[in-house]
Amino acid sequence: DVKVTQSSRYLVKRTGEKVFLECVQDMDHENMFWYRQDPGLGLRLIYFSYDVKMKEKGDIPEGYSVSREKKERFSLILESASTNQTSMYLCASNRNTGELFFGEGSRLTVL
Amino acid sequence: QQQVKQSPQSLIVQKGGISIINCAYENTAFDYFPWYQQFPGKGPALLIAIRPDVSEKKEGRFTISFNKSAKQFSLHIMDSQPGDSATYFCAARSRGSSNTGKLIFGQGTTLQVKP
């Protein structure tokens, strides 16, 4: 079974803190994605990566950066967390097909 | 700039009834339309998908109906069960994204099936 693991299920951070969200997949997938889920807005793509060290902006990249140093690991970084970044963050991966495999999500609260 | 519009936002159906969720899109370059199901505390998972060269796809109690000329597609859940209570997302993939599988998602529909 494909497994996408997000290291932190729940995080509480303060405004201005630097936040790292980690994601690891075990199926040797080329592509990895970070989505943000908010009620009424669905899933919005923040960044994706199609290869190691390669990345592309999604629809809402402002305030975020990413890192992919190894194929299996994709990190989302909030350089200076703000309250409007309180959300559920979902990592996903795939192998050049339409099916995305998602992790269980990281719920971030910024106070 | 949401390119896939989903409705309704929430839906309550009695057990045994039919649940219908609708999506509309504008980009004619979309070539793949999946539906994802998300249970509380879990990530979304692929439920069923369709390509625009067919008008309908059925898998068990779940059916996608696709209307290419109207640029609409819908999910029908027949004989809805309490275990179907979840959030459903429609999505679309642009032909230009076929090598990455990047999807654009709708806003989501929270379905509650009452016993």
Image (cartoon, coloured by chain):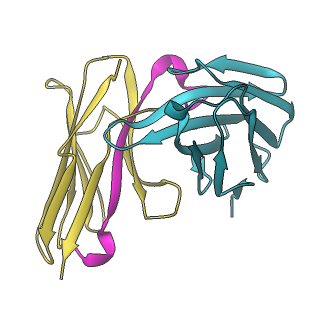
- Image x and y of residue A28, in percent: 80, 45
In the picture as drawn, the residue positioned furthest to the right comes out as A69
The chain displayed yellow equals B
The chain displayed cyan equals A
Residue A15: quarter of image: top right
Residue A78 to residue B28: above or below: below
Look at the image and tell me in which quarter the C terminus of chain A lies: top right
Magenta segment: B81-103
Figure disc tally: 0
Residue B32: quarter of image: top left
- Residue B76: say if magenta: no
Look at the image and tell me in which quarter the N terminus of chain A lies: bottom right
Q: In percent of the image, x 75 and y 54: which residue is there? A: A7
Instruction: Tell which of A76 and B76 is nearer to you.
Output: A76
Q: Is residue B80 visible?
A: no
Q: In percent of the image, x 30 and y 32: which residue is there? A: B53
Residue B5: quarter of image: top left
